[in-house]
Image: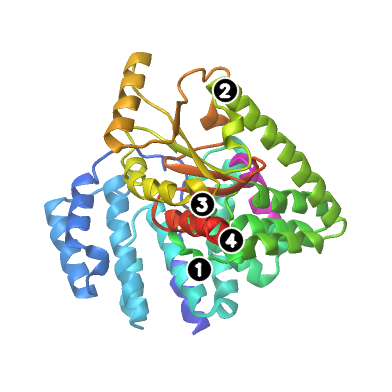
């Protein structure tokens, strides 16, 4: 069985690929992608997946070995292969993997099949998956360290590859691969944001977090201060909202030599920083801090142009009505993209009126040179909701709607329902 899987993953990954030219910007795949969505390809049985693919190849011929259209067809081939593996028809799955044409397709298939094998038996397959992914990871890692190219691919490979290293107990290699990415990503990993958004709050575990894995690997390799700094950042950013997860982070820090004292030092420093930031925000944006004192405050980052932001307003209005007399306040912070200041103000005010929102609103475009709230609070996507405790410390950061929205509602109920 293991020999077969070695052969299988070997087919997935051609070592001699080039990472140059990965940053394609063409749109040749768009008609095909519309067909994929309309056909509900990923929900179809394997026979229909094959029929769809054959039909689309005639409709949208692909003769290249690179480009978005070729990548899209490789995505379909890898999905068909995975469907066969799940049905225990490994020969058919292998046949479809042999048809992969692009470097991106091989990366995607390596991740997809690697994830599947680990989900079946991570102890049995970690060594195989790690050995087959390693040349690809090293190629991307070396290029990234040289000139910062391929960061997206590097980030995409890490969750599966690091899982293998974790199972194999290779903490030094975890640090080696994650350290440059952690710094380049602004002391975080994009996959952690995705995991939180895609996972229901009750199913989320701290061990699903790449930053946590990195922190524990630092601790295991004797880098105690660096490890505690990573864990403290997780604790303080508000991205982790579960009381259990927060307690586990604090507990993990206390088990690192000197960890408890350093963790407390970092949290005290950051809390002071948050208070100063909130004071600066209030001064520049003409917000009355006395009206917020002693209350849980939600900073709601939104814009008139952002459909998901505005889709969240009806429920937010319900929550405001329910909790405003229980110590809850909202400050809407809008960012507008119109060409002129006047147009930004008009779009902002029209959206407020149309959505019927009554809580305090500020326009981030105004006086942004003095205080840019989006930048200061590290907002990279809309909607983002940041929950502050009664002392102005960040205790929750929620990006998007969906599961992230559910986590916000649960956190608010936990704090204010009594």
Q: Of marks 1 and 3, which one's residue comes earlier in the chain?
A: 3
Q: CA distance from mark 4 to mark 3?
A: 15 Å
| Mark 1 residue element | helix
Q: Secondary structure at mark 3?
A: helix
**How far is mark 3 from mark 2, CA to CA?**
26 Å
User: Picture coordinates of residue 226 (x, y %)?
Assistant: 77, 49
User: Is label 2 in a helix, a strand or a loop?
Assistant: loop
Q: Which residue is mark 4?
A: 242
Could you say whether the residue bearing mark 4 is in a helix, strand or loop?
A: loop
Tell me which segment is drawn in magenta.
175-189
Tag 3 residue:
193
**Local crowd at mark 2 within 10 Å, few (<14), some, or many (≥20)?**
some
- Residue 334, above or below 143: above
Q: Earlier in the sequence, mark 3 or mark 2?
A: 3
Q: Which residue is mark 1?
A: 202
Q: Between tags 3 and 2, which lies in front?
A: 2
Instruction: Find the distance from the CA under tag 2 to the CA under tag 4.
Output: 30 Å
**Residue displayed at 30% across by 64% down:** 77
Q: Is residue 365 visible?
A: yes
Given residues 414 and 125, the one toward you in this image is 414
Residue at horizontal 58 percent and vertical 73 percent from the top:
126
Instruction: Name the foreground residue: 21 vs 414.
Output: 414
Horizontal relation, residue 94 to residue 47: left or right:
right
């Amino acid at each position: 069985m293991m020999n077969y899987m070695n052969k299988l993953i070997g087919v997935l990954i051609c070592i001699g690929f080039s990472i140059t030219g990965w940053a394609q910007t063409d749109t040749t795949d768009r008609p095909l992608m519309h067909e994929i969505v309309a056909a509900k390809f990923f929900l179809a049985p394997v026979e229909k997946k094959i029929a769809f693919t054959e039909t689309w190849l005639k409709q949208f011929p692909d003769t290249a070995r690179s480009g978005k259209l070729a990548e899209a067809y490789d995505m379909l081939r890898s999905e068909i292969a995975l469907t066969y593996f799940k049905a225990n028809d490994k020969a058919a799955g292998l046949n479809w993997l042999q048809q992969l044409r692009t470097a991106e397709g091989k990366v995607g298939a390596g991740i997809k099949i690697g994830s599947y094998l680990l989900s079946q038996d991570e102890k049995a397959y970690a060594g195989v998956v790690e050995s087959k992914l390693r040349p690809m990871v090293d190629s991307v890692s070396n290029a990234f360290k040289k000139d910062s190219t391929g960061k997206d691919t590097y980030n995409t490979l890490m969750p599966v590859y690091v899982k293998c290293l974790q199972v194999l107990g290779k903490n030094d290699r975890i640090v080696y691969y994650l350290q440059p990415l952690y710094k380049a990503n602004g002391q975080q990993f994009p996959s952690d944001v995705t995991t939180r958004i895609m996972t229901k709050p009750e199913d989320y575990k701290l061990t699903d977090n790449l930053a946590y894995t990195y922190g524990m690997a630092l601790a295991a390799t004797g880098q105690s201060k660096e490890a505690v700094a990573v864990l403290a950042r997780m604790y303080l950013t508000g991205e982790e909202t579960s009381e259990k997860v927060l307690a586990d982070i604090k507990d993990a820090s206390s088990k690192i030599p000197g960890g408890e004292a350093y963790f407390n030092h970092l949290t005290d420093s950051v809390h002071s920083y948050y208070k100063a930031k909130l004071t600066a925000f209030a001064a520049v944006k003409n917000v009355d801090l006395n009206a917020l004192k002693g209350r849980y405050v939600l900073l709601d980052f939104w814009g008139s142009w952002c459909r998901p932001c505005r889709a969240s307003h009806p429920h937010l209005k319900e929550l405001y009505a329910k909790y405003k007399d229980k110590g809850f306040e909202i400050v809407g912070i809008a960012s507008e993209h119109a060409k002129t200041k006047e147009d930004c103000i008009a779009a902002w005010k029209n959206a407020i009126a149309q959505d019927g929102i009554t809580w305090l609103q500020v326009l981030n475009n105004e006086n942004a040179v003095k205080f840019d709230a989006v930048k200061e609070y590290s907002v990279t996507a809309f909607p983002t909701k940041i929950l502050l405790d009664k002392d102005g410390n960040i205790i929750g950061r929620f990006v998007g709607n969906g599961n992230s929205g559910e986590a916000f509602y649960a956190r608010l109920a936990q704090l204010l329902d009594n």
